[in-house]
Image: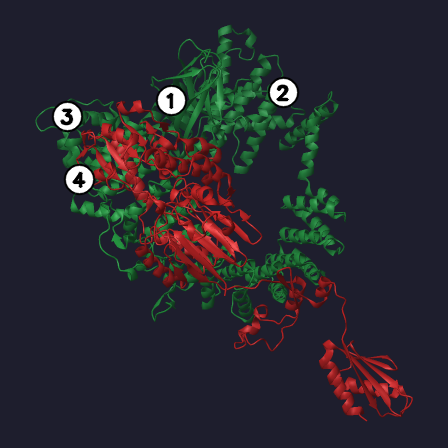
Chain colours: A green, B red
Amino acid sequence: MAALLKKRALAEYCQTQTLVEDGPKPAPTKRLHLVRRSKTVDHSEFITSSLDTTDPQQLLPALVSLHSSLPLAGDSQIEVVQELMKLLLNDTLPPFITTKVLALLANIITSHAQAQPVFEEVMRVAQRTKSKKVLAQVIHSACALSQCIPPDPKLQDQVIQLALSHITTTKFIILVRSLEAVGTLCPGEAGRVQSSIMNTLIEHTSHQDNRVRTAAFNALMVVQEKGVKLPAEVYDSACKALGDDYQCVRAAALFLIKVAAESDPERLVPIPDSDLHMRLVDHAFSQICNVVNDINVRVRTQAASLLGSMSGISEKFLQQTLDKKLMSNMRRKPSAHERALAMLSSGEWSSGKRWADDAPKEHVEADSVSIINTGSCGANVHGLEDEFLEVRNAALDAICSLALNNAQFANQSLDFLVDMFNDEIEEVRLKAIQVLQQIAGHIILRADQLEEILHALKDASLDIRESLHTFLGTTVLSTISSVKICVSSLLDNLRRYPQDRRSIHRCLRHVGQNHPIHVQALVSQLLAVHPYFDGVEPSVQDGEYICKLILVLNAAVQCPTILPLLEQHTIRHYAYLRDTMPQLVPVLKLGEDRQPSREVVSTNTLRFLRESMQRVSSVDQSSTKMRMTIYQTVHSDLVKLADIDPALSPAAHFAALYTQCMLLFTKILSTRNWLTPSSLSLQQSGALKSNVDQLLKHTFRLRHAFTNLSPAEEASIRNLRVRTLALQLVYVVHGSTGSALGLCDNFLEHTEALHRYLTDEKLSADSFLEAVFAELSQLEEPRPGAVARILQPLLLTYPVPALGPITNPAQVHMCSAEIIEPQPDSETIHKLSAGLVVGVHLDSEISHIPDPSTLRIRVAYPDHSTHLIVPPRNHLRLVSPGTYRLLTTVLISAQVSWSEACHVGLSLVLDLSDQEVLAARRHSVAKADDSATIIQLVKPVKVLVWPKSIRKGI
Amino acid sequence: MPEIKVTPLGAGQDVGRSCILVTTGGKNIMLDCGMHMGYNDDRRFPDFTYITDGPLTEFLDCVIISHFHLDHCGALPYMTEMVGYSGPIYMTQPTKALCPVLLEDMRKVAVERKGETNFFTSSMIKDCMKKVITVSLHETVQVDADLEIKAYYAGHVLGAAMFHIRVGQQSLVYTGDYNMTPDRHLGAAWIDKCRPDLLISESTYATTIRDSKRCRERDFLKKVHDCVERGGKVLIPVFALGRVQELCILLDTYWDRMNLKVPVYFHHGPGRDSQQILPHTFVHRNMFDFKHIKPFDKTYMDNPGPMVVFATPGMLHAGLSLTIFKKWAPNQNNMVIMPGYCVQGTVGHKILNGAKKIDFENRTSVEVNLSVEYMSFSAHADAKGIMQLVRHCEPKNVLLVHGENAKMDFLRQKIMQEFNINCYKPGNGETAHISVSSNMEVEVSLSLLKHTMAAPPTSPALPLAPTTSGKAEEQPTKKQKILHGVLIMKNNSMKILGVNEAWGELGIVSHQLRFTERIEVEHIGPVQALTSSLHTLLSQKLGTTQVQVVSEYQLSVADSVVINIQDDNDDPGKNILLSWTHQDEALGSKLLEIIKANFKK
């Protein structure tokens, strides 16, 4: 069978090729294109021919293009290496060619067996060459070659010798390469070689050339990573290098200080000008803190981020990083944070009318003030106040990681983090909120701090507000008034930005769960319950009321004393909310009389699903009519089941769709004279055609909308799809006069793919498929007519098998989407000038789509034209694995003005036209209507749009 | 010992009237030329008679203006046009654009309001500006052959710059006013590690360390926001130029961020000219073009609903801001925010001190019910910032100006303690002599240097060389070496060249100085015998490779010393002619000794 298909494919291929050649003027651009492609694809030919020259002007471009075409395929690699070796032996070539060749060799060769001969030749080049650049490259390449797998210590020794012999040179590039080489090749175990390498490296940390110093520090880093213990003097010289004039040296030294401190944190370091000692890790920490004031941004950023990565620092040093003494005219001045704290503890609020209530108070002794940063003083504060957002971001990260391990530090840094909510860059503000959320477990917010934080809820940026909601959901508030402020701010937020509704609901749910006692005290205020007056019953459509209910009801789970406080209508509203938003409103234990009528019955949906499917498979032998009735009922049952049990919904949908397909199949095959549509009445043929189309659409959906299926289920879907295509082929061959060549190809391709799939998964084909495979393999030439003749009896003989029991119904995923905004019942009319565009905000959640790049927004205009819009990639954010959120603006336009506002449908679809159906498209199967290749994810939401004619004379 | 002389004519131990004379390497430079805002008599301008009576052109090489504040440039037209100076004046482009605007405003106030005579005129300001040469940041400008200046970014206000001035070997940095904490529209001052001999720094906030700017900003924004939320009107009295830009950007971005729709107005007042100049100066972000801030019209004052208004002048003593204040003061929903310091006697000062009722001259009075807030937004470096700048540029001496005497003391002591360098703080008219070490710059030819570096180290190193530790030997590159060369002083510069290069350079034909010694020896026999015996002898003493036989009468040692053997016809003996060059003196005399000892008559 497979052989035949291959033969057919080959024949097909030859045929098309001859067509191209014989055809009247085939598009020349296409041929050119093909030629060019083969050139880039085939490396070996291209290179061997172009490397066979001695003209450096031609050679260099060839080498460069070789470099860009790396990595090479197995056999061409050997050829290229030989060619390059030839070039290496040629001494007449200018140095830059030799350098490039050496670099290429190091890049191409990865295995030790190849490296050996090349290595020797490379080492010989070192003897011959006079060029410094070549020499430097030799050391570099040799180092790389000696590290090929498996590494050869003998070669490495040679490289070390070579590098060390050139260490006295004055040329920086050789020195840098040598230092790099000895650094990477330095043996891990102590010995003569190691000590001489270490000496060399340490010596060069004070070399006159900054590049050499940098290389020396970097090499020391590499050596350290191999587990070699660095001597104490390395640390000292690194500390000294922090004052270097060159930023690259400072940056390299910074890293070295960090790793040195990590390797030996407890060593005691003398403090200059005193007899005291401090721990090495503390010393290193304060050194890095100093660098936070560096003149260069990149070094500052590095220092700030390194601060966060250090661990085991003494409490004293850590807390100093948040310390900044303020003074004014030599008098100690309380910082704004301290003032806020004092104000709060004294119980009075800022009068606002006092001028200079920040007036300095006590006198400071001149000697006691240290303005310049010694030690870790204020490092993080400086980082947060830095001019550049990179540094501020790094400082935030550092504070976050330091605070995660230290609750006290977390609480101290709180004020500063809250300050960052006011940063001018949104990215920093967002990061500050995220940091706060991460350390939420350590902190308790004061009321004044909370107020500052809640202020950010007015921010126009959705990200900021949403992450703040998440934060508020996780944090613990200390007082009743805090909870109250928090709730009122959230309600204010809802008023300001109604699109935050869902996020606020979630947030309030968590707030309610976290603070049941506090909420209890607030219930009567929030719900306006009066001890003896009956209030007006609020409307359940009121957004704010819903928010309050979510808060109270969630609190009521842990604090049952809330329940008696609730009024009768609130309980009724609870029942309503429990129905409409079950994931937000928990189940409450209400008394018998108050229990909402709908009880939670223990349903056995899974068994129902199984039984339904059992029913379908048991009716194989029944009459057609009987089967059709059963299919019908099972289908509607399953659709209902999908609505009832969200956990089983994908599986139920899957089974329902499959049953529907079986129904359609039966319907089509039972239509009398379905093979001669001309003899049918107009109505019958129309129904038949629509049935076939429906079937195609359903199978396509089955094939692509469901993921996480077991191989057997996958196979049965593919089987169904192939069967459908077969049906289509038979139908078209008999029913219409047009060519069915494309359809036939499409069918064969699918069959072949299924065959491969079955062999790969070691599954057995069912009787229909086996028959198809067998018949097809006997076919000489797969003409549509012949294939259709084979298929026709097979389709009738073998009825569609019922879907086997789904192995893991809860695991099946169905791609789906939910459009949150625009709301379906929205009355707003989007007006625009005809010919221009209007943007409609779209907010939706999409789950379980196999490939996000296939997602499209489908805009359906009232004139039945549809547009597919590709949403920008960055508007699609990953919320949780498999779930995306699309926040974008859809542009709607109309060329002519309409007499009134009309509905434009917005929906989300998957456009799979480039995947499977591309083959069909190539054979011009798919018609202009693209509904065959898209999968609708959600029902269209109607938006009122009213294009008006452009007024003249503006 | 060379020295830099610094004489502040103003701003010495004082704030205001910045004018500092610097003499270095024979050049006289004036840094800033400001006026004192506190005086109305002659004391407001620097005392230029200190330099000379009459025109200053021949006594000054250049004038440098750091930024457009009047205490840094206010006396400029007076100096150039009335005292007389026609030399170059340097400033940055924005300073040049804004300076005449402020000067003109000041002139108007002085002449038209206060009725002063003998003040410079508008045309004088124009003439003065014609003498200005603009410099870009980081651009090195060659004032004359020896004097070069370079501008660095200083923050503070638009166009503020620090200047690095170099005369030959000596260099100094003048900071003007600068800001080390970044703002929204101005970054932090930045300077590279230029290691000048002297750093002249301002020290306005010598004894202050400030709180994070974010707290202040947040307070400000929150107060404004809360006020407009409850429907109140906010009045922010400001001065036309300077910090108001910062506040505008702050509010503009905040309005953007918070999606606020409340109108914000800016009344431009006398500074409106700056609007027309600046759009040409700044391409990327026009500091006067805001999304939410619209120009104010007097009729808006009575509009209902919340609004925010920036109005001049800043101390509520006159003008529009006072008019608005009178209107809004009785309503307790409203708010006034004073963003800066207020002079005693102004309405601003009174309300900051909590006055509940303000009386005006025309016997009217206004109840003050609105809330009054004070926010300090200043753009000078605090003590920490000054120390940071000193650390970044690593000067050898520091001189403090533009600050109060008592405060300077503290900072001076701190600088001397932390950095271990000298720090000065001369008063006005007092001259500080700062002695600087002077280095001779000598060019060394590269080939000579390479040759010397490549040569094996001379074992008895100079006494300076660290010979004590064994480590020194491990570091060949670190070892001191003796360099032989010719020192050439030509065209005011010095070079060290290799001998051969020097000949070429100077166009001198090389001469060889040879010493020749004739030694008579008693030797009987053919000349060849003597030659060969001499050869063996010398080979024994010096090594075979050194001695070559040139001919039967001639030997050569080490390719330079020539030994000729002559057969003297008269005497039985022979003459040995020994000739060596001046460079081979040591070898020649040794040979002479050997020959004399062995063949002496």
Q: Of all residues shown, which one is farthest toward the right?
A: B569
Whole-Å distance between the Cαs marked 4 and 1?
50 Å
Q: Which mark is residue A568?
A: 3
Q: Earlier in the sequence, mark 4 or mark 1?
A: 4
Whole-Å distance between the Cαs marked 1 and 3?
42 Å
Between circles 1 and 3, the one closer to the viewer is 3
Q: Secondary structure at mark 2?
A: helix
Whole-Å distance between the Cαs marked 4 and 3?
22 Å
Q: Amino acid at mark 1?
A: Val
B35 or B395, nearer to the observer? B35
The residue tagged 2 is A741
Between circles 1 and 2, the one closer to the viewer is 2
Residue at left 52%, top 34%? A764
Chain letter of the residue beneath label 3 in the structure image: A
Q: Earlier in the sequence, mark 2 or mark 3?
A: 3
**Do discs 2 and 3 belong to a common subunit?**
yes
Residue at left 91%, top 90%? B570
Q: Amino acid at mark 3?
A: Gln
Please state the horizontal and vertical placement of residue A61, each as a whole percent of the image: 69, 44
Q: Of all residues shown, which one is farthest toward the front?
A: B53
Q: Secondary structure at mark 3?
A: helix
